[in-house]
């Protein structure tokens, strides 16, 4: 477990350094990770220079109220879907004024899965000035393993986005 925590801490530090090098701010919109991304980022001293907004929108009503996700989108696609994480990331970016935003929504388990969206299904979105990227992954393991993997993938996606922006 300590090795996993060290890996997340190193990844968070790398994300913050990359943001700092670009003088960019990041906002997070989290559902299944429940604020874990914000926690990992704020564990790094000086993180406020590049991270200032974390929205924990576990309930659909919170996604609508805090991020402006249309109820019709939630009704049509469900919270764990590409259109919803895209709207979450856009809402976080617009409402915070941050240069970049990430969003995560998934089914961490142990229950809640379906044939189409099994336990471990997580959708991600990364919104920048020019585009929004999305990805879906299905992670194995228990609730904590799924959530930890989602935090890692979300942060790695920020580095990927920033790497493309610098190239």
Image (cartoon, grey):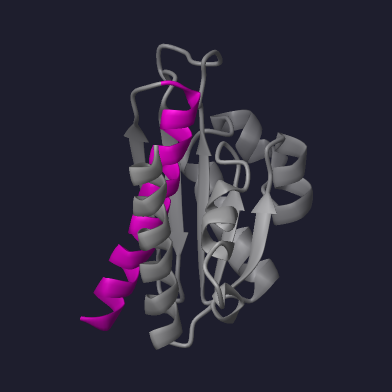
Determine whether, in the image, residue 130 is placed left or right of residue 56: left
Q: Position of residue 53 (x, y in %)?
A: 66, 66
Is the residue 94 above or below the residue 120 in the image?
below
Q: Residue furthest front?
A: 2
User: Front-most of 84 and 145?
Assistant: 145
Is the residue 91 above or below the residue 26 in the image?
above
**Residue displayed at 67% across by 71% down:** 96
> Where, quadrant-wise, is the C terminus in this rendering?
bottom left
> Where, quadrant-wise, is the N terminus in this rendering?
top left
User: Front-most of 69 and 38?
Assistant: 38
User: Front-most of 153 and 44?
Assistant: 44
Can you tell which quarter of the image residue 117 is in? top left
Can you tell which quarter of the image residue 32 is in? top right
User: Front-most of 42 and 18?
Assistant: 42
* Residue segment shown in magenta: 142-167
Is the residue 93 above or below the residue 151 in the image?
below
Determine whether, in the image, residue 89 is placed left or right of residue 140: right
**Residue displayed at 68% across by 54% down:** 55
154 drawn magenta: yes
Determine whether, in the image, residue 41 is placed left or right of residue 124: right
Is the residue 61 above or below the residue 95 in the image?
above
**Residue displayed at 40% across by 18% down:** 116
């Amino acid at each position: 477990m300590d090795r996993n925590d060290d890996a997340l801490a190193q990844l968070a530090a790398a994300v913050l350094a990359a943001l700092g090098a670009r003088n960019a701010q990041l906002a997070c919109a989290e559902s299944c990770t429940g604020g874990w991304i914000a926690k990992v980022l704020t564990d790094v001293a000086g993180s406020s220079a590049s991270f200032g907004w974390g929205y924990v929108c576990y309930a659909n009503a919170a996604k609508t109220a805090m991020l402006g996700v249309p109820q019709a989108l939630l009704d049509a696609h469900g919270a764990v879907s590409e259109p919803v994480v895209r709207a979450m990331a856009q809402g976080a970016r617009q409402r915070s004024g941050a240069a970049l935003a990430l969003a995560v929504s998934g089914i961490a388990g142990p229950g809640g899965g379906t044939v189409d969206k099994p336990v471990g299904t997580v959708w991600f979105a990364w919104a920048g000035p020019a585009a929004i990227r999305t990805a879906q992954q299905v992670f194995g393991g228990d609730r904590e393993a799924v959530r930890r993997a989602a935090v890692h993938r979300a942060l790695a996606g920020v580095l990927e986005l920033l790497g493309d922006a610098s190239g």
